[in-house]
Image (tube, grey):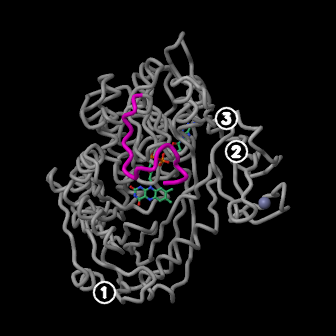
């Protein structure tokens, strides 16, 4: 694989840009792999990359039922941050955030990571107390967090409605300046290209339809392209975790729900940061193309439809317009949705399953894009060694029966009340 | 948005209803701890039909069980429930 560089571009200019090659191969599946990763989203591709790069494994495949990055990786609002209150969560996401800061170099692919600041608004004294608590918890573990006064917020993001008569009056904010956004497709493509160049077989249009069993142990997969044997198998299918685990007879603490996003026509720069709030469920940022990207609550009822509900759209947009009234003049040009795997404590699951050789990475709810590098790193460690990495040990599947849930929102086993 | 036929009020817009959980995840009061844990914390979550408890929260407030396909959203049955229907 030739490296991408300014020099190669320049050289190409003299050869009619004829030097470009496909960024990854399109191999036929082999009869057996040491490790199979099911799901070619960012997480699955990152896992395969670190298996090859860090653990030196050679015989790895990623099986993707559609095209790589066509799931939630290509549908999300691309917010990257590590501003969680609980240590298990902020340690995992901070490990990831540090990787984002060098990811373009690591992959030789521009993932357009843009640390423009992740701003969380507070609308009441109670909100500000919660934000201060969260910021303190982060700073105790060496993660950047700053509390902002009302005046500082007004200067930082001047189009916010700071008036006392605002529908959601703004009292202040917590900012993580190192947070921001990244280019979603580039993350999938960058990991795919880098993994492929280390010998990983990326096999698209290959849906896993069943598991091959030897007693309890899982020793292979049935796919739409035939049976493939494997030493270890890692499920990494986001919203389809419940369905795929079900093929092995497992029932998970997960319910699949629709999550939507929408974008307006492109305009000149008007919002500098990613705006979120402590009390509402609406997040707004401006893409590099100029469109204003909105996200909101999940639809709050189970669905695999990948089709959103206008009730939630209206809610997210109404909140966004209340926060930034200037947005009311813009036209919405696109809306879309993805199937997310809402776990029963709101935190991901990365680790072994009760079945030998079968591992699970899922339950990312609406927040897994930011974790892509950390998820891949820890899952690769787990798949290569058969043991969890220190960072994903708390996120085991058996934490629910042990009463060791990681419930950032404190809402108990009801994903629809989150 | 779906239209749901409330057994008491007739066809109404979905935004009057709230989803609760599946019928098989209601924990019986005398369930053993392992059984209660499994019931509360795991779901079939099928990419197909399941039986779900919904409530006409912003209407008559009654509970009901809806048989629904989770890809097509087709509702094949709605039945009223009372306390006697709970395990
Ligand atoms: C609208 C929306 C907005 C979001 N916003 C954010 C955000 O701002 N920040 C953030 O951090 N996170 C966000 N998320 C969450 C984030 O997108 C996901 O947590 C993350 O992308 C999951 O990563 P993945 O690689 O596992 O998923 P995916 O990219 O969905 O990859 C899973 C892959 O598995 C494949 N697959 C499924 N079943 C099978 C099978 N049987 N056989 C083979 N392959 C199969 C799918 O086709 C898919 O490509 C958002 C999600 C949505 C839907
Ligand atoms: Zn009714």
- Seen from the viewer's position, the closer of residues A9 and A357 is A357
**Residue A107 can be seen in this image:** no
Q: Quadrant of ligand 2?
A: bottom right
Q: Which residue is mark 2?
A: B52
Q: Is residue A131 above or below residue A417?
A: below
Cα–Cα span, label 3 and label 2: 9 Å
Identified at 33% across, 72% down, the residue is A122
For the image shown, how many numbered marks are present on the structure? 3
Q: Check if residue A409 falls in the magenta segment.
A: yes
Q: Are both tags, 3 and 1, on one chain?
A: no
Residue at mark 3: C-beta within 8 A of ligand 2? no
Identified at 28% across, 48% down, the residue is A86
Instruction: State the image quarter where residue A77 is shown.
Output: bottom left
Query: In this picture, which residue range is highlighted in magenta?
Result: A402-418
Q: Secondary structure at mark 3?
A: helix
Q: Residues within 10 Å of mark 1 (few under 14, many from 20)?
A: some
**A346 displayed left or right of A149:** right
Q: Position of residue A347 (x, y in %)?
A: 40, 44
Identified at 79% across, 65% down, the residue is B12
- Seen from the viewer's position, the closer of residues A224 and A245 is A245
Q: Secondary structure at mark 1?
A: loop
Q: Residues within 10 Å of mark 3 (few under 14, many from 20)?
A: some
Q: Which residue is mark 3?
A: B24
């Amino acid at each position: 694989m030739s490296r991408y560089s300014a020099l190669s571009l320049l050289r190409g200019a003299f050869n009619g840009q004829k030097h470009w090659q496909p960024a990854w191969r399109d191999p036929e599946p082999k009869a057996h792999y040491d490790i199979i990763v099911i799901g070619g989203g960012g997480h699955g591709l990152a896992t395969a990359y670190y298996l090859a790069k860090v653990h030196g494994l050679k015989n790895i495949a990623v099986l993707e039922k559609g095209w790589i990055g066509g799931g939630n990786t290509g549908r999300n609002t691309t917010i990257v941050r590590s501003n969680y209150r609980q240590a298990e969560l902020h340690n995992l996401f901070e490990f990831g955030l540090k990787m984002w800061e060098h990811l373009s170099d690591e992959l030789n692919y521009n993932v357009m990571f843009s640390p423009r600041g992740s701003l969380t608004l507070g609308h009441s004294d109670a909100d500000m107390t919660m934000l201060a608590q969260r910021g303190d918890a982060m700073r105790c573990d060496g993660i950047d967090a700053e509390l902002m006064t009302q005046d500082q917020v007004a200067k930082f993001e001047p189009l916010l409605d700071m008036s006392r008569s605002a529908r959601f009056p703004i009292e202040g904010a917590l900012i993580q300046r190192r947070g921001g956004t990244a280019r979603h497709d580039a993350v999938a493509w960058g990991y795919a290209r880098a993994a492929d160049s280390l010998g990983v077989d990326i096999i698209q249009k290959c849906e896993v339809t069943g598991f091959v069993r030897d007693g309890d142990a899982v020793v292979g997969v049935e796919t739409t392209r035939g049976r493939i044997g494997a030493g270890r198998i890692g499920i990494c299918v986001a919203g389809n975790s419940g369905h795929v685990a079900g093929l092995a007879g497992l029932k998970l603490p997960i319910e699949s729900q629709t999550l939507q996003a929408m974008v307006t026509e492109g305009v000149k720069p008007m919002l500098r940061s990613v705006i979120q709030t402590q009390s509402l469920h609406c997040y707004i940022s401006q893409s590099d193309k100029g469109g204003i990207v909105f996200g909101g609550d999940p639809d709050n009822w189970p669905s695999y439809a990948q089709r959103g509900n206008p009730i939630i759209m209206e809610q997210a947009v109404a909140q966004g317009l209340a926060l930034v009234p200037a947005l009311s003049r813009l036209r919405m040009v696109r809306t879309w949705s993805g199937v997310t795997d809402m776990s029963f404590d709101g935190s991901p699951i990365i680790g072994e399953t009760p079945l030998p050789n079968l591992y699970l990475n899922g339950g990312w709810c609406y927040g897994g894009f930011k974790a892509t590098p950390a998820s891949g790193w820890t899952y690769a460690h787990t798949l290569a060694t058969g043991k969890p990495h220190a960072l994903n040990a708390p996120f085991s599947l058996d934490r629910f029966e042990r009463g060791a849930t990681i419930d950032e929102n404190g809402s108990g086993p009801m994903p629809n009340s989150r | 948005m779906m239209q749901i036929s409330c057994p008491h009020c007739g066809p109404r817009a979905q935004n009057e209803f709230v989803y609760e959980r599946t019928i098989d995840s209601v924990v019986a009061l005398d369930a053993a701890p392992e059984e209660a844990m499994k019931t509360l914390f795991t779901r079939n979550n099928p990419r197909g039909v399941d039986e779900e408890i919904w409530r006409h929260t912003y209407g008559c407030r009654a509970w009901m069980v809806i048989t629904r396909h989770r890809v097509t959203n087709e509702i094949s049955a709605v039945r009223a429930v009372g306390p006697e229907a709970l395990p």
